[in-house]
Structure formats: C-alpha cells, structure tokens
Image: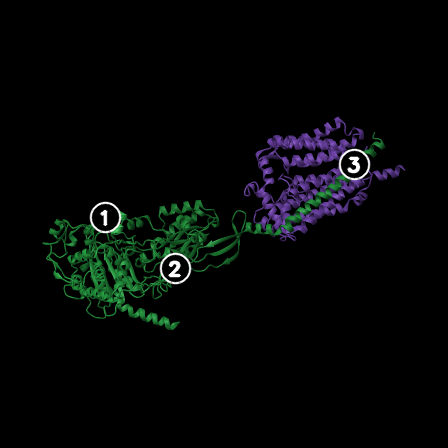
Chain colours: A purple, B green
C-alpha cells in the first residue's frame, strides 16, 4: 500500500514523459512554426533579425516549458506568493531603473536579455491568486477580507504598470486577476456592480486618460477622423485583412506589409499580416489551433485533482483566450488600439517567456494530475 | 486542513463557472469569425480596391507636343531631343563629390550651382533632381565619358520644343514655356495634363491651339511603398502626340519679309486675295522663341522688354496705325458707290500758299506747290490730299465708315485665333458722341479722308482691305491654318454696288505705281508677270506745325519717335491679281520711299512662289 502510494506520488521520469499532453505540445509547435513563417514574411522574405531572434526565443522557451512540466505542481504552488513578490519588486525596479523606449519605461536590463516584468505579471498574478483561493474556504471566498486582499493583489501591479505608462498590459493584468476571482466563486453581483460602476465612472476615467489614449478611443469610434494620423493603423490594418480575401494574397505576397503600410507588423499587428497573406481560411485555421490549445488547457484543468491546478488552468486558458480576442478585435477594428500582443505569434521575448511558463505549469499539472495539494 | 465538503463546493462552483465561460467563449469566437468573414469575404472587393489605391500610383509624363508646318510641310515648330542631366540624390553614394565633379565638367557658375543645391534641398531624396535641362552635345558627351566617375548621374534625352526658323515665326506662332499657375487656372486641359516641366503655349498660335497641340500624357504605373518610393513598374501606357497644325504661310516669303524688316520696326502681311490664306505675316523686330523654352535669362528678357522698338508686340495684329493715304482707295470707292462724285470730278489743289480753309482751320496737301486740277485717277496717283479733303467733306464720315467696315476695318480679321489682335477704330458721328460725349466736327471728317485723326487700322486689316479691292470687291475670310473648313455663308459676297467702281479704284492704284508721277513709281516692276498696283501712305505721328512746314526737314533730321510711319498696300500681279500685301515701317518716313521698295522685292518672290504653290497643290491632289 505504502509502496503503491509512493510509486504514485513519485512518478519516475518516463512516466512523466508519457503523461505529457502531446496534442497541446504539437499544437504549440505548429503555432511556433506558423509564427516563424509569419515573422519571416515580416522580414521581407529573408532571415533577418526578427526571424532569427524569434526562432531562438521560441526554441529556448519551448524547451524551458518542457523542463517546467517535469517540476512538481506542488513546487509552483509553494512558489506562488514568492514569485509574485519578485515580479512586483522587478516592476518597482523598472519604474526607477527601467529602460525607456518610445516614451515608456517597460524593460529592465538583465545583462543577457531585456525583460518586461509586466508581461510576466500576467501569468504570476494568476499563480498567486490561485494559491490564495486554493487556501480560502468556500464560505470565506466572498468575505470582505478575501475580496480586499485579492483586489490589492490586482491593483498594486496594475497601478505600477499604468505609471510606466502601459495601459494595455495593465488592463490585461487586471483581466487575468479578475478571471481568477470569477473562477474562485466571487459573487456575480460584485461583477455586476463593478461593471455598472465602471460604466458610470467612464467619463471620469476618460478625463484622466493621457491625450494619446483619448485619441485612440476617439479614433476607434471613427477611424476616418484622421486617416493619416491616429486612424492610420486601424484603417491600414482593416485594408490589409479585408484585401486578403477568402484565400489570401499568398505567402510573402502581402502588399500592405511589404510596402510598409502596416504599422507594428512584428508585434501587435502580426495577425493582420497573417490574415492578409492567408486569407479567411488561414485565419480560421489559426483560430482553430488556438481553440484546440485553449481546450486542451481547460481539459487538463478538468482532469487535475487539486483545486489549485484546476483554478490555474482554467484561469490561464481563459486569459489566453481573452488576450487573443482583444488582439484580434483590435486589428479587426472592433476594439480601440491597446498594446496587446498575440500569444506566441507576436514578436517579444517577455510575452513568449510568460506564455511558455504558463503552458509549462499547465503541462506540469498534467504530468502531476494525481497530485493533491494540501 | 480543508475538509472534503468544502473542497467539493468550491470545485462545483468552479466547474459551473467554467461551463458558463466556455459558452461565452464560443459565442465570442463566433463573433471574431463572423467579423473576419465580413471583412475578408463580404467586403473583400472594397478593401482590395483600397489596398491597390494604397500601393499603385501613376506618374504622368509630359505629352509630346504637336508640330506646326508651313504650307509645304516644312516643320516650323517641332520637337527636338534635349540632352538633360538628372540626379537622384538617394542613389548617389557621395553627393558632395559627384555634384562638384558635375559642376566642374559643365563649368557651372557659382549662381547656377547654388540654385541646384537649393533645388536639391527642396525635393525628397528619391525624387529626380534636374541639374541641367538643355545641355550642348559636347557637354553631354563629356558627361557620358566621365560616367564611371559619376555614380547615380543620369544623362537623359527628353523631348522639347524647337523653332528651327528662330525669329521668323515668333509673332505668328508665339512660344512655349513652363506652365505657370495662371495657365493651370485658366485652362482645364493644361491642369489635367500638368506635370512638372510641362511646356505650354504663352502667346500666338501656340496658345490658341493649345487644346489640339498638347497631346496626351504617357502614364507609368508603379507600385509604391508607404513612403511613396517606387518599388516596381507595373504598366506603361503610351500617350498620343498632339495634332500637327499646318499653316498657309510660305516660309520663303516669311523669311524674305523678315529680312526686309531687319533693323526696322514694322510689319509685312501677305494674303491670297481669293482664299484669304496668309502667305506671310511678320512683325519686326522679332526675337528667338527658343530662348523661352527653358526659361529666358533675366538679362536677355530685359533686353527684349526694354527695346524701344517693342519686339514683344505683334505689330501685324496689335499695332494700331493711322492708315494715312492707304485709306484713299476706300474713300474714293465710298464716294463713287454713294454717287457723291464721278470719276471725272475735279478739284484744284493750290499748294501751301492757298490751303483749304474751313472754320479757321487750314488743311494742307503734302505737296508744297500743289497738284493743280486733278481728277480721281490723278488724285490717287499723286495722292493729292486736297482732292480727298473735298471728297470726304462731300461724303461725310458716316457713309465712309459703312464702306470701311464692309471692307474689314474696325473688326478682328482672325475672329478669336489670336488673343492679342486689336480691332482698330473706324469712327463715325455716333461713335464720337458715345465714346467722347462730343459732337463730330467737319474738320474731323476732312482729315479722316486722308486717314488721319481718329481712324486706326492694323496692318492685317489694311491687307484684307486691299485684298478685297483686288479680288473685285468680294468678301474673303483670312485664314492662317490650312484646311480650315470653317464655312462662311457670306464668303465671296459682293461688297460693291457697281463693280465698275472697283475697276476704277484698281486702275487708279495701278497708275499710282506704274505711271509717271505716281507716288510709288520708282518701286514699279515693268514685267507684266510681276507688275503690281499699290497705294502709298505716310501717316503723321504728330501734328505738323507751321514751323515744321517752313523747316521742311528730311526724315533723318527728325527725332525717331516723331518720324512718320511709312505704309504701303498693294496687290498683284496686276493682269490677274492673286496676292495683296500691306507694309508698315514705323517711323520710317514716307511710304513711297521706304515702304514701297520692299513690295517690289516681295512681289518678285511672291509671284515666283505662286507657281510652286500651285504645283504643290496639284501634286497633292494627284497623290490623294
């Protein structure tokens, strides 16, 4: 009996290896391949800086994800608060000693790479809150203390990111946090009221927005207001996607991106380029791959034994879903432009690192699905 | 320690909420897909067009201008290949070095060089910088020989306007120059076809026939990037060359008239009396229109502008002159037509001692001693002023003005072909009342009878008048463009009441040139083949005072601006008239000594050229 449990708890390496989710892994690999091909296209059909760098990052972080999957989920549980605190420290560090680029301090220099702590926070806030709600008893979830604590957990990093300033990422951090609260069983009425409150206070919030952010909202409402200025990105993005048609213009043949009409084509607008070149079919296929990935993440959560793992997987899957939806809605002209990358597809090390850590923890939940956490 | 039931409630809630969210996710995903469908399938056409509009840009090239030909098909305004030097700054590695090297090779002045540098700073680096728009062949080949050293420099051959006969046709054709803002505002066609460097007609026929001459642009279609840089050429659409316009002018006669007017200010017009075709039309002094094609230099422009002989004025059309005695045939004709006088009507010209006196004013004949008793023929022959004072007095200005207008005075000869054509002035009593608010006085009628006073005519009007007398008194419409198929219903309509009257006038003009004591007797041609008939005229620029009359100065003794204009109108050959001409030499002196001799030279050539012209017509007829 003892032998049995021990055998179960301490899975050997090969068993863990066998327990890896190969559907998820292959989907991630396909996605990685697609993102590399797209990056190759943004470089104008040559292997230049972006393609090479993206490839290296994908390989490193993908391997890192595999490594993470072999680490017991308990380890991540125990690391929940600490990692959150470390990232928080990094955010404070960013504010004081960050690298300034295009008007905001988002990066810190770690000598071998520049890292964007706000991107990491998107994942570690889920980890932290998941750990917290794992411990809170069911009847205490809606207690004043619990709500206050979780709101503090959310608001502190959020405000630290806002002052960088980086509205997009801070919103994504908040959304990640709120998703966990939702799954943890916070009463619906709180969400309802806060929604109401935010709608009422919208004019006040707008008055606090920076001029360029106000412009973005106005531009979203009417992109033709200033077609060469603020409305340029959204108009050109829509033209690119729309002109792609059903089957697309063909790989490396996206005129909008080749002739440099597309802004930020490596990062936020990568989907535009993909959609222009591969058309409606390609876009739907890409969405399908993302859907499978999210489904697998949630499936892993459903199969996990521990509440922590479930909560993390559900929240992580949902967050990824929301990131994708926000990014795509933005490039398709459904939402105002906020800086939000498309997971894995977009160029950007920190985003990739965070996403891969997330998938690693999910994979670890899979390999340790029978692990219960006290 | 978490108990089982607690854990179970939490898990239940978690799974329930996951289910709610999963449903929401599917709906949202559906929304994204439908948005994609909307943009990429439903609105695809719209965005495809927008995308093409983004990336495809068209460049218009200057159209190739139509040519002008003379009657015999010689090109009088054509196109030539101009050697130009272009640099695209972006394609040059070391711009400073290259531009200094070019400066050295082309021997550019410091001023020109600074202008180029200024131009370079105004354009985008990938736009073409035109360093020189008209290089000589030597410099062009020099550049070509040094191309190895001049990376990014492009020797270009471009099409530009050329006037091979230089100053000969300036006033007829006008000239072309860079289109300016005013051209764009006034002419839609130019605006539509405008490209930087487009040359358009500024005056003369070049301007009048702009629509036909301009042609259509060639269009290059390029794919461009977001910054407007050309990436690749997609298409080339060749434009049409402008129409070639053939004139009725004979270059040989035009050249001769130019030769005859050298160093003088004046005009020569030659016309076919039956077709109205202009054989030559020259205004002097002239200038070389080629200097305007690439922009005239300030010095050269000032020289032309400030020349007291006014080279910029087309004297044939815009010069208003008192016709002087050249009006006399018309005065006589009018009097005959109105049956005021008969050809044997006689007046005694008593000379300066006994001038005609009217209300205290005296009216002198030009001849000091007087002509004695003269009839119409004698009076025309010797240009007796006293005779025509009396005729005019009896005729009255109103009847004269009707005849004058019938013969084409006081109105534009070329409708609207030339925008600088003047209408001249044929006065009558009503005109004076309206224009000056005073009543006509008899003295004004008297001087109108010898072509002085208010009456103003242009040389081309005098030419037309003479032509219509020469052809027997029939209306003609002058034309300068060959194969002008404008049909006028009253073409060749008789302008006389009795054709005998026209004969009398023709005969009187014949006597003036070909009989002893005729005012242009010395310029006659005896060979009947060339023999012509004409009437001299000397129009005063200022009133002759008693003092002047006593001094009786020779022309060269009078200051230039105060000298008389010399005029001559003629037609020939007398046996079977075909051509009429008018000659005006500004401040030349007397018509008989200055203007008439030119007609002699002209008629020799005109008659000789007539054979060639006829043969050319016939041959052309056979070719068809």
Label annotation for residue B439: 1
Q: Earlier in the sequence, mark 1 or mark 2?
A: 2
- Are the residues flagged by discs 1 and 2 from a single subunit? yes
Tag 3 residue = B14
Tag 2 residue = B79
- Give how far across and how far down residue B123 sits, in percent: 45, 46
**Residue closer to the observer: A71 or B281:** B281
Dot 2 falls on a residue whose secondary structure is strand
Residue projecting furthest to the bottom: B622
- Give how far across and how far down residue A26 sits, in percent: 74, 48
- Give how far across and how far down residue B271 sits, in percent: 29, 63
Q: Mark 1 to mark 2: distance in Å?
A: 56 Å
- Are the residues flagged by discs 3 and 2 from a single subunit? yes
Nearest to the eye among marks 1 and 3: give it.
Answer: 1
Nearest to the eye among marks 1 and 2: give it.
Answer: 1
Q: Residue at x 72, y 36 (%)?
A: A179
Mark 2 nearby-residue class (10 Å; few <14, some 14–19, many ≥20) = some
The chain holding disc 3 is B
Asked whether the viewer can see residue A68, the reply is no
> Image quadrant for the N terminus of chain B?
top right
Q: Mark 1 to mark 3: distance in Å?
A: 115 Å
Q: Is residue B84 above or below residue A181?
A: below
- Give how far across and how far down residue B209 sits, in percent: 38, 57
Mark 3 nearby-residue class (10 Å; few <14, some 14–19, many ≥20) = many
Q: Residue at x 85, y 31 (%)?
A: B3
Q: Earlier in the sequence, mark 1 or mark 3?
A: 3
Dot 1 falls on a residue whose secondary structure is loop
Dot 3 falls on a residue whose secondary structure is helix
Q: Is residue B584 left or right of residue B162?
A: left
> Image quadrant for the C terminus of chain B?
bottom left
**Residue closer to the observer: B338 or B150:** B338
Q: Is residue B607 left or right of residue B554?
A: right
């Amino acid at each position: 009996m003892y032998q049995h449990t021990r055998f179960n708890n301490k899975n050997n390496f090969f068993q863990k290896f066998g327990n890896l989710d190969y559907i998820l892994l292959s989907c991630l690999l396909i996605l990685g391949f697609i993102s590399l091909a797209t990056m190759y296209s943004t470089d104008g059909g040559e292997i230049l800086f972006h393609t090479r760098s993206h490839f290296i990052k994908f390989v490193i972080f993908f391997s890192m994800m595999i490594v993470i999957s072999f680490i017991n989920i308990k380890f991540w549980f125990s690391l929940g608060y600490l990692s959150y605190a470390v990232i928080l420290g990094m955010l404070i560090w960013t504010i004081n000693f960050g690298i300034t680029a295009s008007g905001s301090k988002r990066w810190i220099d770690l000598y071998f790479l520049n890292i964007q702590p706000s991107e990491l926070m998107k994942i570690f806030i889920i980890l932290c809150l998941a750990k917290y709600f794992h411990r809170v008893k069911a009847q205490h979830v809606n207690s004043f203390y619990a709500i206050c604590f979780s709101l503090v957990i959310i608001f502190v990093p959020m405000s630290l990111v806002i002052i960088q300033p980086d509205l997009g990422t801070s919103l994504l951090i908040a959304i990640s946090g709120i998703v966990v609260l939702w799954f943890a069983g916070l009463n619906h009425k709180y969400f309802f009221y806060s929604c109401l409150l935010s709608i009422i206070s919208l004019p006040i919030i707008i008055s606090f927005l920076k001029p360029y952010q106000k412009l973005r909202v106005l531009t979203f409402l009417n992109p033709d207001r200033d077609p060469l200025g603020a409305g340029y990105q959204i108009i050109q993005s829509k033209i690119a996607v729309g002109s792609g048609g059903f089957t697309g213009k063909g790989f490396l043949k996206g005129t909008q991106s080749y002739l440099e009409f597309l802004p930020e084509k490596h990062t936020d607008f990568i989907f535009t380029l993909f959609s222009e070149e591969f058309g409606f079919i390609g876009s739907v296929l890409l969405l399908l791959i993302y859907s499978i990935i999210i489904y697998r993440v949630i499936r892993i959560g459903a199969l996990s034994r521990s509440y922590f793992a479930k909560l993390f997987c559900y929240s992580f899957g949902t967050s990824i879903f929301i990131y994708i939806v926000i990014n795509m809605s933005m490039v398709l002209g459904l939402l105002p432009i906020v800086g939000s990358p498309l997971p894995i597809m977009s160029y950007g090390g920190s985003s990739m690192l965070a996403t891969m850590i997330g998938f690693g923890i999910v994979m670890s939940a899979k390999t340790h699905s029978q692990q219960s956490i006290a | 320690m978490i108990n089982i039931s607690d854990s179970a409630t939490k898990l239940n809630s978690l799974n329930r909420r996951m289910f709610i969210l999963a449903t929401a996710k599917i709906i949202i995903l559906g929304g994204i897909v439908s948005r994609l469908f909307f943009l990429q399938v439903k609105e695809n056409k719209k965005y495809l067009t927008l995308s093409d509009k983004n990336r495809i840009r068209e460049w218009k090239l200057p159209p190739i201008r139509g040519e002008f030909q003379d009657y015999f098909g010689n090109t009088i305004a054509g196109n030539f290949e101009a050697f130009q030097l272009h640099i695209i700054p972006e394609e040059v590695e070391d711009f400073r070095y290259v531009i200094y090297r070019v400066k050295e090779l082309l021997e550019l002045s410091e001023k020109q060089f600074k202008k180029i540098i200024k131009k370079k700073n105004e354009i985008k680096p990938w736009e073409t910088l035109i360093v020189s728009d008209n290089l000589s062949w030597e410099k062009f080949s020099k550049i070509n020989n040094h191309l190895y050293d001049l990376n990014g420099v492009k020797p270009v051959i471009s099409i530009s306007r050329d006037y091979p006969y230089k100053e000969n046709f300036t006033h007829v054709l006008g000239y072309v120059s860079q289109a300016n803002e005013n051209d764009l505002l006034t002419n839609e066609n130019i605006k539509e076809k405008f490209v930087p460097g487009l040359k358009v007609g500024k005056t003369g026929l070049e301007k009048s026939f702009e629509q036909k001459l301009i042609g259509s642009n060639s269009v290059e279609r390029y794919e461009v990037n977001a910054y407007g840089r050309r990436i690749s050429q997609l298409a080339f659409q060749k434009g049409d060359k402008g129409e070639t316009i053939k004139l009725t002018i004979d270059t040989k006669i035009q050249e001769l008239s130019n030769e005859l007017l050298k160093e003088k200010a004046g005009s020569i017009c030659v016309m076919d009396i039956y077709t109205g075709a202009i054989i030559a039309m020259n205004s002097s002094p002239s200038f070389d229109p080629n200097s305007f094609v690439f922009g005239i230099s300030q010095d050269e422009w000032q020289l032309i502008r400030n020349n007291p002989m006014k080279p910029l004025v087309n004297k044939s059309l815009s010069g208003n002159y008192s016709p002087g005695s050249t009006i006399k045939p018309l005065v006589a004709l009018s009097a005959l037509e109105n049956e005021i006088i008969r050809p044997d009507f006689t007046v005694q010209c008593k000379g300066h001692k006994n001038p005609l006196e009217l209300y205290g004013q005296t009216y002198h004949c030009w001849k000091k001693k007087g002509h004695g008793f003269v009839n119409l023929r004698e009076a025309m022959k010797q240009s007796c002023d006293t005779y025509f004072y009396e005729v005019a007095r009896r005729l009255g200005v109103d009847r004269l003005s009707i005849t004058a207008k019938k013969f084409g005075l006081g109105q534009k000869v070329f409708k609207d072909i030339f925008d600088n054509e003047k209408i001249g002035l044929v006065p009558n009593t009503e005109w004076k009342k309206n224009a000056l608010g005073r009543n006509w006085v008899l003295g004004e009628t008297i001087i109108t009878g010898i072509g002085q006073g208010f009456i103003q005519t242009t040389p081309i009007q005098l030419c037309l008048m003479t032509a219509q007398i020469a052809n027997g008194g029939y209306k003609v419409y002058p034309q300068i463009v060959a194969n002008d198929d404008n049909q006028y219903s009253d073409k060749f309509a008789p302008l006389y009441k009795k054709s005998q009257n026209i004969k009398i006038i023709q005969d009187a003009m014949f006597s003036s040139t070909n009989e002893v004591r005729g005012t242009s007797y010395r310029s006659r041609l005896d060979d009947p083949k060339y023999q012509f008939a004409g009437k001299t005229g000397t129009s005063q620029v200022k009133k002759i005072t008693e003092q002047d009359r006593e001094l009786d100065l020779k022309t060269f003794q009078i200051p230039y601006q105060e000298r008389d204009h010399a005029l001559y109108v003629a037609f020939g050959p007398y046996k079977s008239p075909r051509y009429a001409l008018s000659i005006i030499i500004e401040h030349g002196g007397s018509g008989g000594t200055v203007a008439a001799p030119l007609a002699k030279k002209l008629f020799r050539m005109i008659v000789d050229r007539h054979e060639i012209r006829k043969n050319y017509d016939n041959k052309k007829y056979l070719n068809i």
